[in-house]
Image: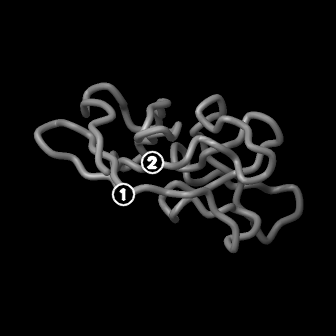
Amino acid sequence: MEQVVCHTDELQPGEMMESTLGKHSIVVCRASDGHYYAFLNRCIHQGAPLSKGKLCGAPAPTDNIGEYNFEKDGDILRCPWHGREFDVKNEGRMLVNEKYKVKNFHVTVENNQVIVYN
């Protein structure tokens, strides 16, 4: 199954939107580099709608206590309920434990149309 979910001018880098693929609610994300990603619109923790969360960045570890670096701005999908964070550019894998991930879908762009399929 494949479906056009939006046009390329509807999402800017760092933005996301809710859509559907058949009977499934999905969240379509446009990462900081302009690439599109799509995921089941349901957090793996307790089922929160990820489209109500944020597409943001995350703190990165440093060698100095109390020092923080911020990275991946526009590439981290954060759950609205409990703050679980998923890397959209790494198949929707959870930041704290890459063993877990949100179901992802394939995305292509043709003639300025964003197409999601499984």
Residue at 51% x, 41% y: name it: 24
Q: Quadrant of the C terminus?
A: bottom left
Residue 82 rendering spot, x and y as whole percentages: 83, 41
Q: Secondary structure at mark 2?
A: strand
**Which residue occupies the extreme right position in the image?**
65
Amino acid type, mark 2: Ala
Q: Residue furthest front?
A: 23
- Tell me which label, 2 or 1, sits earlier in the chain: 2
Q: Quadrant of residue 11?
A: top left
Q: In the image shown, does 9 or 104 lie closer to the viewer?
A: 104
Whether the residues at callouts 2 and 1 have beta carbons within 8 Å, the answer is: yes
Image check: 64 left or right of 101?
right
Q: Residue 13 appears at what percent x and percent y?
A: 39, 38
Helix, strand or loop at disc 1? strand
Answer few, some or many: residues within 10 Å of disc 2's Cα (few below 14, many 20 plus, some between 14 and 19): many
Percent coordinates x, y for residue 87 in the rendering? 58, 57
Q: Position of residue 111 (x, y in %)?
A: 11, 39
Rendered image: mark on residue 38: 2
Q: Residue at x 67, y 71 (%)?
A: 98
Disc ID at residue 19: none
Q: Residue at x 65, y 43 (%)?
A: 42
Q: Nearer the viewer, residue 41 or 8?
A: 41
Q: Nearer the viewer, residue 34 or 97?
A: 97
Disc 1 target residue? 106
Q: Is residue 1 left or right of residue 55?
A: left
Could you say which quadrant of the image residue 60 lies in?
bottom right
Label 1 neighbour load within 10 Å: few <14, some 14-19, many 20+: some
